Amino acid sequence: MAKYELLNNTSHKDLKVDTQLKADYGDNVHAVPTYLTEFEDVQREYPILFRHDLDDFEAFVVFGFQREENLFLTQAGWSAKYVPAVVARGPFLIGYQRDENGGPEEPMIHVDMDSPRLSEAEGQPVFLEHGGNTPYIDRVSRQLLAIHEGIELNKAMFSAFSALDLIEPVVMDVEIPGQQPFRLQGYYTIHEEKLANLKEADLVALHRAGFLRAAYLVLSSLGNLSRMVEMKKARMLDE
């Protein structure tokens, strides 16, 4: 059970974080949410796919083809240069807190004190000796900001994509010699033909909102699925 506290340099002055990525810390997941604010980095190494949750779509970066399968997580560490923000943020998240005068709630960094990554003995320090932020927590702050801003951007992006009927289901059959074939399903992507045939006014509107580039980044990212199939084959041969 998570136990979140508002991060501060008094109560948490000696806090350290083990930034290693490993299964023991819950990093062996096949997909995590991703946001428009990081699409540029994500699409270079991972597939970006969509899921439909309740009444809306969400974007996910996909690491594997099955539950609890992360092909990028190895015994030597993470095998890609860019680690998506939801993973890299570690035990931190954005929470909301009112100031002492009862003003509007402001986003502030909170930390899960029940996280196994935390200790006061080993890891990356969160605060400097005299109370200032370390480069590590400054980096985490940027990752949290990307998530925080990305949530609203994603909502607007999917609203635009849905209005233009640009989202379609995607199914991928994966066959590995000597193994039972399996199917990647339940995801969606951009309908490339419909995107190419949009009216000029719709293209301009998407471009001005920053969503046209996002659509092409999603399509470009799908090429990483083939790379993941090869990673899957190599892993199964090693087992």
Image: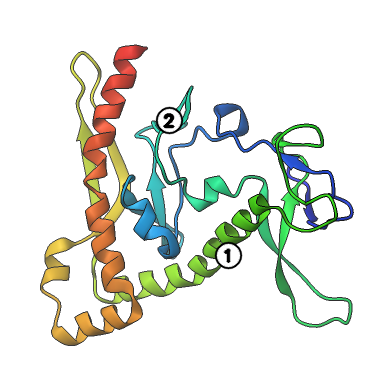
Q: Quadrant location of residue 64? A: top left
Q: With 37 as the anchor, is 184 left or right in this view? A: left
Contact flag, marks 2 and 1 (Cβ < 8 Å): no
- Relative height, residue 78 to residue 187 (above, below): above
Q: Quadrant of the C terminus?
A: top left
Return the residue at label 2: 69
How far from the left and from the top, in percent, is residue 8? 82, 58
- Relative height, residue 189 to residue 21 (above, below): below
SS for dot 2 = loop
How far from the left and from the top, in percent, is residue 195? 17, 69
Mark sitting on residue 145: 1
Mark 2 residue type: Glu
How far from the left and from the top, in percent, is residue 145? 58, 65
- Residue at 56% across / 57% down in the picture? 143
The crowd level at tag 2 (other Cα within 10 Å; few <14, some 14-19, many 20+) is some
SS for dot 1 = helix
Q: Residue reaching furthest bottom?
A: 201
Please identify, in this view, whether the residue under mark 2 or under mark 1 is nearer the observer: 1
**Colouring style:** rainbow
- Residue at 19% across / 62% down in the picture? 191
How far from the left and from the top, in percent, is residue 173? 20, 35
Between the residue at mark 2 and the residue at mark 1, the CA separation in whole angstroms equals 28 Å
